[in-house]
Image (cartoon, rainbow, N blue to C red):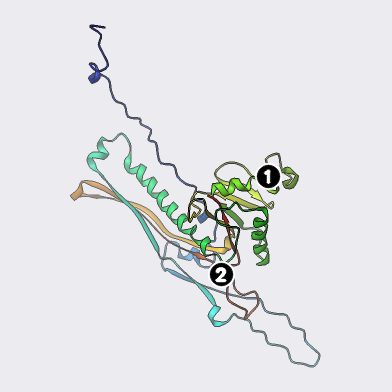
Amino acid sequence: MAGTLTVTQAACHIPELWSADTRDAVEATVVAAGLVESSKYGLAELKGGPGDITNIPYISNPTANTKTANTNITLEVIGPSSAEASQTFTVSTHQHVAFAVENITEVQSKTNLRAKYTDKAGYALGAAADTNLHTLPNLFSQSVGTLGVEPTFDNWQRASQYLDDANAPEGGRFIIVRPATYYAMRKIDQFVNADYTGGGAGGQMTVGREQVGTIWGNVPVYKSTLVRAPSAGQAENWYCHREGVYYCSQDMKSRADFVIERDSDVVLSTHIYGYAEALQPPITAGGGAATDAFNVLVNGTS
């Protein structure tokens, strides 16, 4: 209609708005570092420095001997062979996230970009450490199931038996799986049916993030997309005891400095840490090699 003021004609009067709320990238669940051993065996002493190595000596079980009357006692070998006397743990991984925010950007931005990205740097470093921990199941000597195939109830029972055979304590066991493997677990009657679990209609497996259930009455199940997927549709899931893996976060910090030449705040976040499979000493003194008997790789789907 003639004489009508259109949106195009009034464009200079219509503001373009920017939300004060930012849409932040989602963050994966970081769980592995909090489940494995990080305080015993000299690991706590490494935190904050000094030092980069702790040596963990082994003590095996002696053998009881029957004494015959009027005979000499049997002197027992009370230590492992010299080649298997200890395990060495080293802190050697050093990762960082760094960025700069120009003064003019900080002054004119409605969002506190330095604070936002400092928080994100902390997450990135934590997720990177967890991702490295999730490479360890590929090294486990014990495994069940087939990559790319949903683990069966028998697979889970066999994995549990491996830990029983190693005399791994009941307390301290845990499972970490990718989401697809978790939902495969929810198809197994023995894990969700109240006739087996003794729980409510949903059994002991719930939908959520981080800890999402319990099996065998006391083994917590955690879910994370950081669990290693070597190829599409595959997952290398954990069934372990906390003393099956060592982890030491020696130093994690963020610092900011104003750099005159750049007229910018430069923020540096760093993380120094170490991680390794924990080996179990021979059961009997003078026995065979130390093994990773407290760890089981459960192959599954992603």
In the orientation shown, which residue stands out farthest toward the top? 2
- Residue 141: x, y in percent? 57, 67
Mark 1 or mark 2: whose residue is earlier in sequence: 1
Q: Which quadrant would residue 48 be assigned to in this image? A: bottom left
| Picture residue at 54% right of the left edge, 63% below the top | 245
Q: Say which amino acid is labelled 1.
A: Val
Contact between marks 1 and 2 (CB within 8 A): the answer is no
Q: Secondary structure at mark 2?
A: loop
Q: Which mark is residue 192?
A: 1
- Residue 88: x, y in percent? 49, 72
- Residue 287: x, y in percent? 62, 79
Circle 1 residues within 10 Å: few <14, some 14–19, many ≥20: many
In the picture, the quarter occupied by the N terminus is: top left
Circle 2 residues within 10 Å: few <14, some 14–19, many ≥20: many
Residue position for label 2: 279
Q: Is residue 24 visible?
A: yes
Vertical placement of residue 102 versus 77, above or below: above
